[in-house]
Image: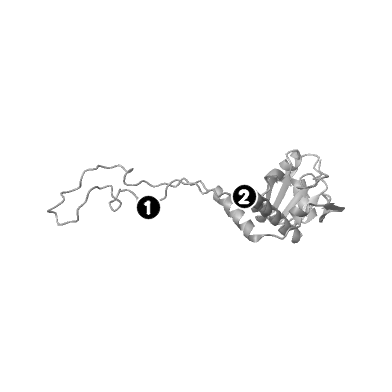
Amino acid sequence: MASIALKKSTGASAGNIDVADELFAVQPNVPVMHQVVTAQLAGRRAGTSATKTRAEVAGTGKKPFNQKGTGGARQGSTRAPHYTGGGIAHGPQPRKYTQRTPRKMVRLALASALSDRNLEGRVIVLDSWGFEAPSTKAAIKTLAAVGASGKVLVVVTPAEENAIKSFRNLPEVQMILVGELNAYDILCNDWIVFSKDSLPGNKEAK
């Protein structure tokens, strides 16, 4: 079983903690991560872009001029696409961009992303957050002590209220509940910081 160094909020070592091999020690599958992330981003698209066709624009259905005798091409309606104010030909219509992604693929993408960050040594596990009360200043000090710089993903449980309130105002920190952990958010951040309780697959968690 793989293990990760366990740290205190002060940066001191607290030993090692065993982690699930199926989450933190798999061979990263780049194509699967790409497909799952693409599907996740596609699902965020509203798909509400719309244009009016010649059947929907306002205007008369009367023939603009006589069929013959004008010397010009025959015309049937001023709502045709080539008229100013006419309908749009082949314009966007409301649609869904969602892609079906098998659950096994989603789990593999998550494990690949976690394993990739673990291979780079960018997964940090804390024995506890150590916040007696909500404090943004203490949160900044904790991240500096454990060496997490740049974009940081902080993974918490709903019960860790002091940690949630401490990290939520930091612009370079993205906070996420452990149940919402996904490949896209992991890959968007440089460091992943867990507490022992929010570490997925940890049997020692309360």
| SS at circle 2 | loop
Q: Is residue 181 visible?
A: yes
- In the picture provided, is 108 more to the left or to the right than 67? right
Q: Amino acid at mark 2?
A: Pro
Q: Is residue 150 visible?
A: no
| SS at circle 1 | loop
Q: Position of residue 76 (x, y in %)?
A: 22, 48
The reply to whether callout 2 and callout 1 are in contact (CB within 8 Å) is no
Is 68 drawn above or below residue 61 in the view shown?
Answer: below
Which residue bears the numbered disc 2? 102
Nearest the eye: 42 or 107: 107
Q: Nearer the viewer, mark 2 or mark 1?
A: 2
Q: Amino acid at mark 1?
A: His
The picture quadrant where one finds residue 5 is bottom right
Q: Residues within 10 Å of mark 1 (few under 14, many from 20)?
A: few
Nearest the eye: 118 or 145: 118
- In the picture provided, is 17 more to the left or to the right than 108? right
Nearest the eye: 27 or 153: 27
Nearest the eye: 153 or 27: 27
Which residue bears the numbered disc 1? 90
**For marks 2 and 1 on the same chain, the one whose residue lies earlier in the sequence:** 1
Q: Position of residue 84 (x, y in %)?
A: 29, 51
Estimate the spatial distance between the alpha carbons at disc 2 and disc 1, rounded to whole Å: 33 Å
